[in-house]
Image (cartoon, grey):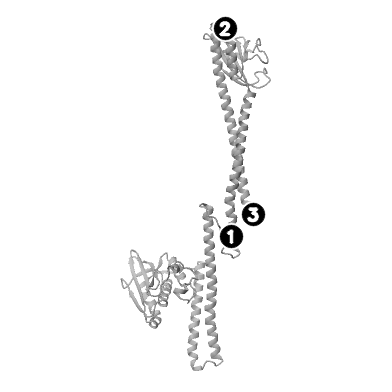
Amino acid sequence: MSKNRLFKKLFISNMIIILITLSILSGMFYLMFQNYYFADKEKIMLEEAQEINAILNEFAVGDINIDKWNQELNVVTRLINATVWIVDKEGLIYSQSQQQGKAWTGVSLSKEEIKSILDGQSVVKKGYFGGKFNQPVLTVGVPLVINGRIEGAIFMHAPLTEMNKTIINIFILMLLSGGVALIIGFVLISYTSSKISQPLKEMSLAVQQVAKGNFSARVQHKEEDEIGDLAKSFNIMAKELEQLENMRKDFVANVSHELRSPLTSIQGYIDGILDGTIPKEKACDYLKIVQKETRRMSRLIDDFLEMTKLESGQFPLNKTEFDINELIRLAVIKFEKRIVEKDLAVKVDFEEDRRIVIGDRDKIEQVLTNLIDNAIKFSKERGIIHIFTEIKDDKVFITIKDNGIGISPEDQEHIWDRFYKADKSRGKDGAGLGLYIVKRIINAHNEEIWVESEVGKGTAFTFTLSVKKF
């Protein structure tokens, strides 16, 4: 039951809307047609009354005889399906059409019933005409004008029952049409409700799968509509969660490996020193190895803590004015030993000796350290590292370029992701957090950073900083 709740809501609500709409339209159309039908009937009866008046004028001057008069009268009255009375000034009915039924000839009408007509007015009424008919009629009364003088009245009585039958037949036809429309609406609403509810149902099941940790769940909905956009967004989210989960697993595995290796070495060397396996004269050398491994563990933990702060939003910037050229020189000096060991040539070019920028000095130093460290790590023996700055408008562009192994186009799309490591092209050291942290630091400064690289030819990282305006 609960699996089709949305379908039922959509179906029932749409059917109610259709029923209400059809009911209102049917009622309005019925009233409009009824008013139009009666108004048209009144108009025809008034016109035919004038026609009868013209025939009476011909009869009065002797142009037609009594038989011709009765024939013409009955033709007109059959045409409009009405009983016609010819009444004199005293209210006496001295002629009538359609002799079937009650004979009204010789019956007198009250003065009140003909007074307004004798005054030259036309009368239109619905009802029983003072109780003279046992069924409701539409009555039209006009003055009888002979030779320019009002000599009586012409009354025409059309039964409303016949007119109502016509209207009811039309109303039944409307109901039948509405029933057909309702059936068609039933089919269309069932289809559209299913089209809307089914992908949402699939999405709900997919969400449950994701909640259980199955990030491979996807929604198959390819329609170009809002639900299709939602399905695409969900699939993108699920894909990113799947990638993140894979990165997390890789990260845990990497961290476990990175921590286990130095811990095993540290434990082995210390045990060897303590139990005498390692001679005392070599203890200092092994302690230096232990020191190196502990520092590697410390860097790994620092990267992890830095990432945690970035993710939690606890990343305040302490922006100051500082000389970026001087900071670059100091950053290069820190790597002097590794540069010498790898026999690298480092070329530094500045457009000006000093260039004051605005930013968090410590965080920018961290960016430079990460980028220079990568350049050294992935440069070939006796390679070249080129660091230079350029001024464009109110920005300084800092570039760290190496001629190392390069980064493939596929890896370039992911190098800024946390935990990502391009093992084949970028080595296996670290947990894949360095460039992620760099990117977040630059973004926090509202600046830009990008990479240009070609496999086998080298890589260049460039980022921007705001120049101090004097």
Q: Which residue is mark 2?
A: 65
Q: Which residue is mark 1?
A: 206
Q: To which quarter of the image does residue 145 belong?
A: top right
| Secondary structure of the residue carrying numbered label 2 | loop
Quadrant showing the C terminus: bottom left
- Label 2 or label 3, whichever lies nearer to me, is 2
| Secondary structure of the residue carrying numbered label 3 | helix
Q: Which residue is at the far top?
A: 62
Q: Is residue 119 visible?
A: no
For marks 1 and 3, give the CA distance: 14 Å
Q: Are marks 2 and 1 in contact (CB under 8 Å)?
A: no
In the displayed structure image, the side of residue 251 where residue 318 appears, left or right? left
Please provide percent x and percent y for residue 376.
Answer: 40, 77
Q: Return the mark for residue 3.
A: 3
Please provide percent x and percent y for residue 109.
Answer: 64, 13
Count of numbered circles in the view: 3
- Taking the spot 51% from the left edge, 67% from the top edge, the residue there is 311
The kind of residue on which mark 1 rests is: Ala
Between 71 and 201, which is closer to the camera in this rendering?
71
For marks 2 and 1, give the CA distance: 95 Å
In the displayed structure image, the side of residue 114 where residue 446 appears, left or right? left
| Label 1 vs 3, first from the N-terminus | 3
Q: Is residue 411 visible?
A: yes
The kind of residue on which mark 2 rests is: Asn
- Label 2 or label 1, whichever lies nearer to me, is 2
Q: Return the mark for residue 15.
A: none
| Label 2 vs 3, first from the N-terminus | 3
In the displayed structure image, the side of residue 150 where residue 389 appears, left or right? left
